[in-house]
Image (spheres, grey):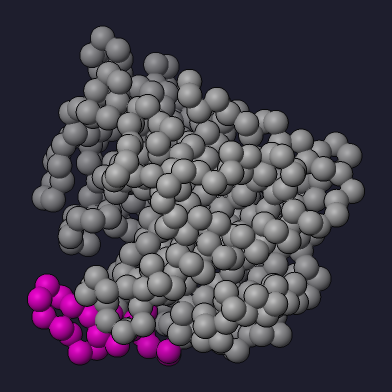
């Protein structure tokens, strides 16, 4: 039997003061690769079964859908300190493509790197110019979405959190550097994470190892700091998937250009990160005091407020960048509870702090959801594959018919359950109310 996740993850959960479900707590690091129902949370099993009309088709074939769910209940004590109870459903190490969810830890670590540099005059809003020095690289001299038309870490993170902008991620990947990004994630305990390529740009492995030089300028255009081009010599980990292959494959066939390749698609050279790691990062960002001493992000209170604001802001509330309909709508990138729902935001008291990803038929959302009126709060993360024909790169995926409805229903069911659950102490959520019109 293979080990699903490293003991480091349990250490992370323990260091956060998590009071995990007793059954899950003792077996989490030993979840087998398949048929792991004995390790599933009884609570989630019950909720999914009671709502079989909403979940049955996916739950009954959860292996084919690569379904994974993590649900965290939050209870406050008399001092408003959070205590976490984690529930897992079908959490395995089956590969899923994380798509845009890799942008979340990258945005967090970009802010951390600024603090680590600790250079006078450089902050998230400082102008950062990206240069080109290697094959496949492109330069950035301006940003039409910002008020001053100058690119910055701050503006890139806004675009990532509001609409999941791919170029914004690429620029932060280049700023941090491939090796530094992965080494920092590993130091935080995420041992087999690999974020090794830019998004939406067909570059070679060598091109992705080379990251652009960048320059920071003060408001008068004077050079403050230069970071040269970097080359990553990190070793890429190879890992057998649940099919027993020597690489990670999934599906039946895939398209390479206009040609249909009659074999499963190889994801061994793609980004990868476990769902529990994304869930852990969400907990750390939303609850900074839950971080352990040995695994602590080097972020300031200003950093956390900035992240919280744009993780929960609706795209149509943003003025810089400015996102308007019909290309964008209030619930854009809010899959849990909202699916692909258009129109007005349904409940002004509900805010969703999250990061989604969708590509190759994989659909992922990692979220912390609050209702300020009912004092409801919980975390939920879900990953699934919506590709019933088993063919990748054909742009025929089941997001609309299966994925979005499943995530919408999952969020709603958990919300209704938590809203009715009795709590000894109701949370004070006032620190998470922001003036989005400023």
Of residues 109 and 385, which is closer to you in this image?
A: 385
Quadrant location of the N terminus in the rendered image? bottom right
Of residues 331 and 181, which is closer to you in this image?
A: 331
Q: Do we see residue 309 in this rendering?
A: yes
- Number of numbered tags placed on the structure image: 0
Identify the residue shown where x is 50% and y is 28%. 436
Residue 385 image offset from top left, x and y in percent: 42, 74
Q: Is residue 278 left or right of residue 162?
A: right
Image: 384 above or below 187: below
Q: Do we see residue 180 in this rendering?
A: no
Residue 269 image offset from top left, x and y in percent: 30, 69
Identify the residue shown where x is 34% and y is 44%. 328
Residue 210 image offset from top left, x and y in percent: 22, 50
Of residues 178 and 404, which is closer to you in this image?
A: 404
Identify the residue shown where x is 38% and y is 23%. 125
Image: 47 above or below 193: below
Residue 87 image offset from top left, x and y in percent: 70, 67
Q: Is 366 included in the stretch rendered in magenta?
A: no
Image: 98 above or below 373: below
**Quadrant of the rendered structure where residue 372 is?**
top right
Q: Is residue 252 left or right of residue 89?
A: left
Of residues 211 and 104, which is closer to you in this image?
A: 104
Q: Is 247 included in the stretch rendered in magenta?
A: yes
Identify the residue shown where x is 36% and y is 39%. 159
Magenta stretch bounds: 243-265
Q: Is residue 314 left or right of residue 150?
A: right
**Quadrant of the rendered structure where residue 89 is?**
bottom right
């Amino acid at each position: 039997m293979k080990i699903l996740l490293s003991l480091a993850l349990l250490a992370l959960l323990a260091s956060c003061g998590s009071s995990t479900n007793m059954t899950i707590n003792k077996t989490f690091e030993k979840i087998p690769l398949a048929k792991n129902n004995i390790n599933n949370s009884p609570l989630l099993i019950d909720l999914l079964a009671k709502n079989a009309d909403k979940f049955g088709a996916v739950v009954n074939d959860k292996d084919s859908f690569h379904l994974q769910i993590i649900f965290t209940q939050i209870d406050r004590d008399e001092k408003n300190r959070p205590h976490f109870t984690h529930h897992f459903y079908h959490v395995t190490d089956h590969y899923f493509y994380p798509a845009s969810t890799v942008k979340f830890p990258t945005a967090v670590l970009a802010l951390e790197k600024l603090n680590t540099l600790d250079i006078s005059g450089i902050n998230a809003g400082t102008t950062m110019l990206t240069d080109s020095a290697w094959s496949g690289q492109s330069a950035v001299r301006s940003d039409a979405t910002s008020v001053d038309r100058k690119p910055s870490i701050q503006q890139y993170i806004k675009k990532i959190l509001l609409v999941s902008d791919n170029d914004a991620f690429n620029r932060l990947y280049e700023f941090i550097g491939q090796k530094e990004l992965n080494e920092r994630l590993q130091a935080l305990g995420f041992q087999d994470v690999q974020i090794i390529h830019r998004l939406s740009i067909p570059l070679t492995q060598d091109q992705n190892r080379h990251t652009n030089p960048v320059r920071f300028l003060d408001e008068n255009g004077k050079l403050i700091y230069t970071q040269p081009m970097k080359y990553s010599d990190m070793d890429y980990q190879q890992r057998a998937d649940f099919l027993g292959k020597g690489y990670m494959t999934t599906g039946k066939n895939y398209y390479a250009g206009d040609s249909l390749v009659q074999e499963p698609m190889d994801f061994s050279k793609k980004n990868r990160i476990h769902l529990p790691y994304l869930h852990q990062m969400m907990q750390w960002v939303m609850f900074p005091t839950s971080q352990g001493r040995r695994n602590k992000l080097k972020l300031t209170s200003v950093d956390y407020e900035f992240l919280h604001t744009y993780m929960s802001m609706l795209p149509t509330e943003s003025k810089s960048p400015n996102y308007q309909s019909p290309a964008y709508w209030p619930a854009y990138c809010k899959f849990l509870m909202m699916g692909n729902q258009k129109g007005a935001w349904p409940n002004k008291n509900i805010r969703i702090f999250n990061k989604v990803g969708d590509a190759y038929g994989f659909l992922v959302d990692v979220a912390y959801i609050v209702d300020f009126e009912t004092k409801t709060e919980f975390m939920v993360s879900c990953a699934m594959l919506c590709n019933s024909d088993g063919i990748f790169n054909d742009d025929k995926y089941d997001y609309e018919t299966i994925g979005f409805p499943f995530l919408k229903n999952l969020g709603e069911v958990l919300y209704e359950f938590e809203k009715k659950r009795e709590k000894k102490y109701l949370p004070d959520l006032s620190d998470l109310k922001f003036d989005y019109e400023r």
